[in-house]
Amino acid sequence: MDLSFTPEEIAFRDEVRAFFADEYPADIREKVNRGIRLDKDDHVRWQKILAQHGYMGVNWPVEYGGTGWSPVQKYLFSIEMANANAPDVVPFGVNMVGPVIYSYGNEAQKQRFLPDILESNVWWCQGYSEPGAGSDLASLKTMAVRDGDHYVINGTKTWTTLGQHAEWIFLLARTNTDVARRQEGISFILADMSTPGITVRPIITIEGGHEVNEVHFEDARVPVENLVGEEGRGWTYGKVLLQHERTNIAGVARSKYRLARLKELASSSQHGAKPLMEQATFRGKLVATEVALKALEYTDLRTLAAVATGKAPGPESSILKIKGTEMQQRLDTLYMEAAGYYALPYVPDQFTLDAADDDVVVDSSEPTTALRYFNYRKASIYGGSNEIQKNIIAKHVLGL
Amino acid sequence: MDLSFTPEEIAFRDEVRAFFADEYPADIREKVNRGIRLDKDDHVRWQKILAQHGYMGVNWPVEYGGTGWSPVQKYLFSIEMANANAPDVVPFGVNMVGPVIYSYGNEAQKQRFLPDILESNVWWCQGYSEPGAGSDLASLKTMAVRDGDHYVINGTKTWTTLGQHAEWIFLLARTNTDVARRQEGISFILADMSTPGITVRPIITIEGGHEVNEVHFEDARVPVENLVGEEGRGWTYGKVLLQHERTNIAGVARSKYRLARLKELASSSQHGAKPLMEQATFRGKLVATEVALKALEYTDLRTLAAVATGKAPGPESSILKIKGTEMQQRLDTLYMEAAGYYALPYVPDQFTLDAADDDVVVDSSEPTTALRYFNYRKASIYGGSNEIQKNIIAKHVLGL
Amino acid sequence: MDFSISEDQSMLQDSVARFIQDEYDFDSRQEAAATDTGFSADRWREFAELGWTAVPFSEEDGGLDGGAVELMLLMEQFGRGLVVEPYLPCIVLAGGVLKRLATEDQKATWLADIIGGEKLAALAYAEPQARYDLNDVAVTASADGDGYVLNGHKTVVLNGGSADTLVVSARTSGERQDAEGISLFVVDASSAGIKRKAYPTVDARQAAEIHFEQVRVGADQLLGAAGEGLATLKAVIDDATIAVCAEAVGIMQVLNYKTLEYSKQRVQFGVPIASFQALQHRMVEMFMIYEQTRSLLLHAVMTEEADAGADAALHALKIQIGTEGRKLGEEAVQLHGGMGVTWELDVAHYFKRLTMIDTLFGNADHHIEQYPLAV
Amino acid sequence: MDFSISEDQSMLQDSVARFIQDEYDFDSRQEAAATDTGFSADRWREFAELGWTAVPFSEEDGGLDGGAVELMLLMEQFGRGLVVEPYLPCIVLAGGVLKRLATEDQKATWLADIIGGEKLAALAYAEPQARYDLNDVAVTASADGDGYVLNGHKTVVLNGGSADTLVVSARTSGERQDAEGISLFVVDASSAGIKRKAYPTVDARQAAEIHFEQVRVGADQLLGAAGEGLATLKAVIDDATIAVCAEAVGIMQVLNYKTLEYSKQRVQFGVPIASFQALQHRMVEMFMIYEQTRSLLLHAVMTEEADAGADAALHALKIQIGTEGRKLGEEAVQLHGGMGVTWELDVAHYFKRLTMIDTLFGNADHHIEQYPLAV
C-alpha cells in the first residue's frame, strides 16, 4: 500500500496544471467563478482548446483519438480541472454517444461521427427518458417504424439537457413491440435535429433556468443507416452508455474544490460578531462533511485502483453515485447556511459578464448559492435516482 | 389555547408531589438512583404503598377501584413520579390483564382477580410472543385443546418479562385451527404458573441481565373457567390490551427527568479540561435532544387533550411509540458519551445495596450507563417494533 | 392546558382557509408573483377589507386585538396558499414596531393607513455586516437640530421596494455591536436621500437594498426613547419568527399531502410508488416531522401568549423548521422525482419558500448557538 | 497510489484469517471471556508461536518489522473473530512505548518476554480526572535518591489485572495539564505499593483500577528522557487508534454479513424479511457505511505509513467509527429484532465491542473537537 504518486504521474500532473494555468480562457473562468451560465460558444471554444491539447477523449481508446490515460492520470486530471474551476466537458458527445459508436457502430458511422465529437464540431443531446417514465427506462413508448430505408419516429423524449443547442440527438426507440421482455425490441438511433418533425420545447426548472427540454418526434424520418449496431439491441448499448455516464460520478475533485472554497469563505466572512468558521455548529458540520468527503475520495480511489487492475467497476459504483450526489447536496446546503439571508436575492440580471455595476444590487461572494442549491436537488434524481441505485446494490451486491 | 393548569390541577400535583416526598421508601430510591435492579419484594412493597393511597388503578374506571383521573392528572402524576425517580408499576397485572378482565371477564373473574391485581397480591406475566414469531403475533402456535372442563395447553411463549416472579400468566392460545383468517380461533386464557407442565427458562439479554424468560407449556391443564370472554375472540381482546400497553408509551416524564440529570452531570463533570456542557459538539447534541423532547412532549399532550375531549387515541399514537423510544435511546447514547471510558467497567457485584465499599471499584456517578444503553436497544423492538409502527401509520393514517 | 381555539379564532381560521382554497389558486399566485411588485394590489385590498391587516393591532388603534394564536392561524393558511402579499413585512414587522412604540399622533400619521391597507410599510433593520445579530447596527442617526440625519446601508429589506413607509433602526450612540444606543425611526420612503434598489427573492417575494444618504428626519419620527430600540426590535422579530414558522407549518402540511397524493397516482414498474415500503416509511417520517413541528409551533404560541419566557420555545421551533423542516421539503421533492424540480409544479415553489424561511430571523445554526441550556 | 498489499502481508493476513475461521469459534471465545483473566493463556501462547506478538517490533528487537499495514491486517481479523486476548494493551500499548523508548538493556529486561509471550503488560495512562486529554496527568513521580517514587491513581487500565509489567505515565514536573513534565516508567506489577482492582468490561475485556502508593522505581526504569513522554504517548495512542479502528472495521464486516444472512432466512408475515424494501435500503446504508469506513481506514494507514501528518486522517477515522459505525451496529441489532438483544447471539457481542471502541482513545465528540480544519 502506498499513498504516493510515481514521478511520471507527478510530471503529468504538473503538465496538466500548467495547461489549465495557461490555456483556460480568462473570460470563461470569470463567468464560472461568478456563477454565470456559459453559452454554447463558451463550451465549444473551451472544448476545442482541450481537443487541441489532446485532452478530450479521456476515456477513449487511443485508436479513436483517446488519451489512453491510466485511472490515476484521469483522477489527477479531474483534480486539476476542478482546482482551475474549469467547466466540465459537455458529456453527451464525448462521454455518451461516442463510446457507443466506437463500440457498436459500423466503420462508416465511426468515420462520420467520431472526429466531429472529439473536435466539438457537432453538439449532441440525449433522447432517453420519456414523460412519466422516470427511473423506469424500459417503459419507453417512442416508436421507430421502418418505412423503406427510413425509420419514422413518433414520441416524446424529456429531460434532454442542453438540447436547445444540439445538432444531433441519440435516442432509444421501440422498433419491435412483439417481444417477451420490455427491454427487447429497443433500438439505438442517431438523428439530425434539423429533421422535419423534430421540435424542442424548453422545460424551466425549479430555480428558473432553461437547461432541460422536451424533444418531440412527429413522423420524423431518419435514414436506416443511422441505426447503431443491431436492431432491437439498443437496451444493451444503452446500459453501456449509462456506465460511461457514471464516469467520475462521485465528483470528488469538484467537491474537494468546493469544500476548500467554503472554508475560505467561512474563515473570511465579515458577517456577524465572529467568522462562521469559529461558530461551533457550523464548524461541526464542516468537520463531518470533510470526513465524509475523505471517505468518498478513498472509496473512489479504491474503485479506480480496481479498474486499473482490470476489474470492471461493478454495481458497487452505485455507491459513488449515491454518496457523490449526497456530498454535492450537502455542500450546497452548507453554502446556503453560510450565505444566510444573502441567499435570498434573485438577481438574474447581474449574471451576465457585461452587467453594469448598477445591476449588481447585492455584492455577495456567492450570488448563485440558492439557485445552485435548488437546481442540484436534481442530482439525487437523475442518472438513475438514488433509490434505484439502492435497489441495484441490494440486488446485485447484497444478493437481496 | 392555554398553557396553564387549573387551580385544582395544581393542588392535585402538590398532593402527589408530597406523596412521593413522604412515602417513597428511601432504600428503594437509593437502589433506583444507583441503577441496582429491584427485587420482587421491592416492587410489591412499593406498589402496596401506591395502592394504599389509591394510586394504583390510574387507567381503571372508578367502579373497579380505579382513580378516575383526567388525562391531565395522569400526565401530572407521571411527571411527579419521574421526578422522584420512583420505579414504574410493573404493568402486566394492572395495565394489561386487569383492563381485559374488567372489560371482557365475567363477574366471578372480576371478583377473583381484580382486587389482587390492584393490591399487588398476585404477580402476573404475559404470554404473547412466541419463538420465531417476532412482530407477527398472529402466527402464534400455542394450542389449547378442550378436554372436559379443562384446556390442555402446549407450546412456548417468549420474551416474558419478569416471568420468573409470576404467580399467574395470561396468554393467547389457539383453540381452533379451522379458521379463515389467522387472527381467528385464538383465545385469551389465564393460568396459574404452578400448574404442572408450566416451566420457566431464563433468557439472558445482551447486557447480562435476567429479565425475560421463555415459558413452556407441556400438557398443562387449565380449567375452562379461566377463559376470558368468548372462545376464539382472544385476538380482539389482545389488541385492546396492546393499546393499554401503549399507555404512556412516549415516556416523556422519564425522558425529561433523565435529560435534566444529564445536563447536571455534563455541567459538573470533573473530566477533562472543561465541563462537557461547554464542549461544542456535546452541547449541540443536547440542544437537538431538548428540541426533540419538547416536540415529543407537546405531541403527547395534544394526544392527551384529544383523549380528554372523547377522541380515542388513534393509530397516530404509533408516533408516540416511535419517537418515545427513539428519545430514550438517544438519551442512552448521550449518557454513554458523557461517561467516556467510564462506560467500560462491568461490575455487577457493586449493584447490591449492601456491597462493601471495596466492591465499588469504579466510583462513577452512572455505573450502569452501558448496561442500560445495551438493554434498551430492545425499546425499538418490543411492543410492536418501530418498523411495524411505521407500517401502521402508513396504512391507517396515511392511507398508503 | 388547553389546545382548543375560541369561536372567534375558529371563524378567523375558517375565513382565511376558505379564501385560500376558493380564491387563491396557484396560477393567479404565480401571475401576481411575476408582476413588478411581486404581489397583487387587489388582493391586498381584499385582505384589508376582510380585516386581516387589522388582526394584530389593538382595538384602540382600529385593530382586532389578535395575539400569537390569531397570527399563527392566519400565517398557517398563508403558508398553505403560498401567499405572496406582504403581510409579514408590512403588518408583522413594520406594524409590529409602530404598534408598540408609536404615540397617538404617530399612529394617526403612520399606522392607520397601514392597518387600512392604503399604505405599505417595511422594516429596515438588517445590515450587510450584521448577519443575524440584531444589536449589530452601523447605520447612524446623528442628532441635527431638533431632528436626526440618517446615513448607511440596510440590506435585504423585505418589501423594501414597494413600501411607502419605512421603519428604520439606526445607531444614535455607542459602538457597532452595543446593545444600547439603537433607535427606531419612521420615515417616508420617498424622503430625499433614500436610494432603493428592489429585486425579487428566490422564493418569489421582494426585497431591497436601501441606502440612506443624509436623510433628515424630525424629532417626531423617533419611535420610543432614543437608544432603547433593541428590546422592541427583538420582540417584533420574535413575532415575525412565530409568523414564518406558522407559515412553514402550513407549507409542510401541503407538501405532505401533495407527496402522498402523488405517490398514489404515480406508477413506476407497473405499480403506484406508494406501494414501495421504503418510500412508505419515508412518508411516515415526513408525517412525523410535520406533527412534531406543529407541536413545537403550538408550544411556542402558547408560551408567548402566557408571557412565560418564550425564548427557548422560539429557538426550538426555528431550529426544528431549519433542520427537520428542510428535510421534509427535500424529501417531498425527491419523492416527486424529476417533476419536483420543475418550475411548472407547485411543489417546487412550496419547497423554495420553506427552505428560504430558514434564512429569515436567524437560521437553525444561529438558534442552536443561542439556545439557552440552563440546567 | 497503490492499495495492494505485499506477498508477506498477504501471508500474514491469510494465516490470521484461517486461524480465526478454523479455530477461534464463538463458543470457545465465550468460555475464555468467562474465565477470571478474561482470555485464554493457551491462545496467547499460540499467538506468540505464530509470531503475531512479534509483528510490530523491529528485527533487532526480535520482531517482524511490521508497520501500520500489518497491524491493520491483524486487527481486522481479530475484530472478525472478536478476539479477547490482550493484543491491544500488551503489544500495541505497552509494547509500543517500550519499543520506542527502551534502551537495549531495558528491552532485554522488559520487552523480550513480552514479544515472546511469556509476560503480559499494560499501559497505565488514563486518570479519573483526565477524560481523553493525554496531557492531563496527576500521578506523580518524585525524584528520590537516584530513583523516583510513584503516587496516584490510574483508571480503566486495559489488561491491568493480568499484566506482569506496567508502563506508567507520571508527572515529574509541571502542572496537571502541562504538556511538559510527563515521564514514562516501566515497573513490575507486583512491586510494593501497587494496589490493583481488576474487573471485566462490558465488552468482555478486562481492566483495572491501579493505585500507586509510594512505589519506588529505579532510574533504570525511566523510559526515555524525563519530562518528555507526551510525544511518545501520543504516537502510541495513534497506533492503538488505528488498531481498534481496524478491529471495528472487521466487526462491521461481520455484522453486515450476519444481518444479510439473517434477513434472508428470517420469515415474517410469510416472507423473508430480506424482501421488505425498507429493510433492503437500510442494509444498503449499512453496506455503504462499511465501505466508506474501510476507505478511511486505508487512508489513515497509508498516511501513517507515508509519515504524511496522519492527525486529520486518524481523527476522521475515529469520528467515522464513533458515528457511522455506531449506527451500523444499532441497525444490525434492530434488524435482528428480539434475538439481537440476547446474550446467546454472537451479534450482540460484536455490537457491544463495536460500541465500546468509541469510548477508547477519544470518542467521536473528542475527535470532532480536535479535528484540524485548516483552510
Image (tube, coloured by chain):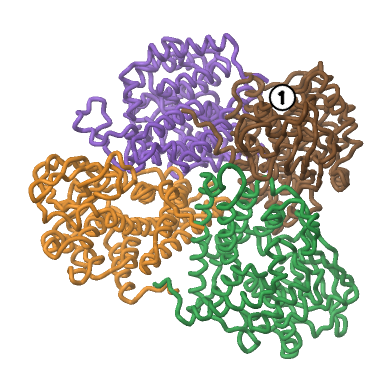
Chain colours: A purple, B green, C orange, D brown
With D150 as the anchor, is A358 left or right in this view?
Answer: left
Q: In percent of the image, x 79 and y 66: which residue is there?
A: B157
Report helix, strand or loop for mark 1: helix
Q: Quick one: label 1, few (<14), some, or many (20+) residues within 10 Å? A: many
Q: Quadrant of the N terminus of chain A?
A: top right
With A286 as the anchor, is B132 left or right in this view?
Answer: right
Q: Is residue C172 above or below residue C16?
A: above
Q: Amino acid at mark 1?
A: Val
Q: Looking at this view, is A97 or D373 the one in front?
A: D373
Q: In percent of the image, x 71 and y 49: which residue is there?
A: D263
Q: Position of residue B49 (x, y in %)?
A: 69, 80
Question: Can the viewer see residue C32?
Answer: yes
Which residue lies under the disc numbered 1?
D69
Residue C208, quarter of the rendered image: top left
Q: Position of residue A222 (x, y in %)?
A: 41, 27
Q: Is residue A294 above or below residue D362?
A: above
Q: Is residue C110 above or below residue C162?
A: below
